[in-house]
Image (cartoon, rainbow, N blue to C red):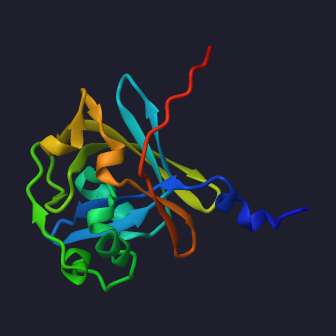
Amino acid sequence: MNVSLDKYYGLISPRPTVCISTVDSDGNSNLAPYSFLTPLSFDPPLIVIGVGEGKDTLVNAREIGDFVVTPLTEEWMVEGIKTGKSLPKGESEFELAGLNTVSSEKIDSPSVAEAKVNIECEYYDEFEVGDHILLVGEVVNISASEDAVKNSRLAIENLGAVGHISGEEFSIAREITKIKRS
């Protein structure tokens, strides 16, 4: 059976879902959900996010030079998804969704107070690819709550990590399975 090419992303899912927070030069915070992302490098630690040209996330990251990647979890996924609504410049998606900002430790963009993990990134580079811009950030700090960390690694099963399938369909991680590569 052939599947329409515009449906390919639904076949490679669920994709990790995050919210990206930024701030503009007037101090207005922005928050938006994304599921086109992946770690890119260990040294330096880089992450890449596919962002549509003209989005506040991209404009602010270019202007201010940083952003926060916050993995979406079951506890605040409904609020996080709400941030996908387009608002006029200067209106905060944090406020729309009922989420709170907290100062990040090493960058200007705010972190999400309700989140158990906030990954602070400095703008590293960007590349135009298809109909998106690949926004590359260098990870400079990770803040995590105690219950988010287990055995020196993030405990996905405890966080209820959210993955985007397609449209309004999402999945929630409930367990981790180990498979030997022998």
Which x, y percent locates residue 157? Answer: 35, 46
Residue 166 x %, y %:
59, 68
Name the one closer to the observer, 142 or 161: 161
Position of the C terminus, as image quadrant, is top right
Relative to the observer, which residue lies in front, 110 or 151?
A: 151
| Residue visible at 72% across and 66% down in the picture | 7
**Within the image, what quadrant is residue 151 found in?**
top left
Position of residue 40 measured from the top left corner of the image (x, y, whole percent): 47, 35
Whether residue 144 is visible to the viewer of this picture, yes or no, is: no
Q: Residue furthest bottom?
A: 88
In this rendered view, identify the residue nearer to me: 14 or 113: 14
The answer, for residue 78, to whether it is visible in the render is: yes
Residue for point 28% across, 81% down:
89
Number of marks drawn:
0
Which residue shows up at 26% across the image and 52% down it? 68
Q: Residue at x 38, y 81 (%)?
A: 85
Q: Nearer the viewer, residue 61 or 113?
A: 113
Q: Toward which corner of the image does residue 142 lie, by quadrant? A: top left
Residue 122, quarter of picture: top left
Looking at the rendered image, the quarter that the N terminus falls into is bottom right
Q: What percent of the width, then of the height, locates residue 47?
A: 40, 41
Residue 26 relative to residue 133: left or right: left
The relative height of residue 38 versus residue 18 in the rendered view (above or below) is: above
